[in-house]
Amino acid sequence: MRKYVLILFVLSTLIAAKCNKDKECHSSITCINKSNDTIIWAMKTLYASSNLCKLEGTALVYNQSKTYDVRYCWEDEFYNNKKLEFFIVNPNKYNNDTVFYSCDSLEFKNNILKHYILDLEDLQRMNWTVTYP
C-alpha cells in the first residue's frame, strides 16, 4: 500500500511540475534611468488595511538600472484586472520612507515625475523593463 501511495505522489508531482512548466513566469521587473538626472524608482506600500501609504524606492543615476525580484511569478499578481503602480520621483522631494502618510497626500510629500499604471499586457509589451523617460 505504501508503495502505491509513493507512486501516486511521484506521478502527481510530475504532472504538477509539467503544468507549471508550460506557464510563463517572470520573477523580475527592471527599471532603467535614461534621463540626465538622478531619480527614485518607487512602489506604493500600503499599511495593513488602512488609508496609510508611502513610496519606497531606490535612487538611480543616469543609465543605471535596478531589478525588482520576487520569489513568485509576477503574472500571478494580475488577477481581477489588477495593475502595478510604479513612481518616478525627484529625490529632492521624496517622502521619508520609514513613515506612512495618508494615501491622499503622496503627491504633496513627493515630487512625482511619472506615474506608471501597468497591467500584464503592458509589461509583456515592455519586455518586463520600465525605461524612464
Image (spheres, grey):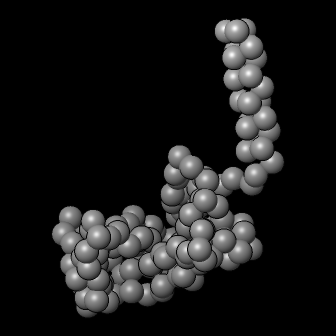
Q: Residue at x 21, y 72 (%)?
A: 100
Q: Residue at x 60, y 68 (%)?
A: 78
Quarter assignment of residue 107: bottom left
Quarter assignment of residue 34: bottom right
Camera sees residue 131 = no
Front in this rendered view, residue 66 or 1: 1
Look at the image and tell me in which quarter the N terminus lies: top right
- The answer to whether residue 100 is left or right of residue 63 is left
Q: Is residue 106 above or below residue 26?
A: below
Q: Position of residue 113 (x, y in %)?
A: 43, 87
Camera sees residue 108 = yes
- The answer to whether residue 117 is left or right of residue 56 is right
Front in this rendered view, residue 33 or 52: 52
- The answer to whether residue 89 is left or right of residue 84 is left
Q: Residue at x 68, y 77 (%)?
A: 122
Q: Residue at x 61, y 53 (%)?
A: 73
Q: Position of residue 22 (x, y in %)?
A: 81, 48
Q: Is residue 86 above or below residue 15?
A: below
Q: Position of residue 6 (x, y in %)?
A: 70, 15
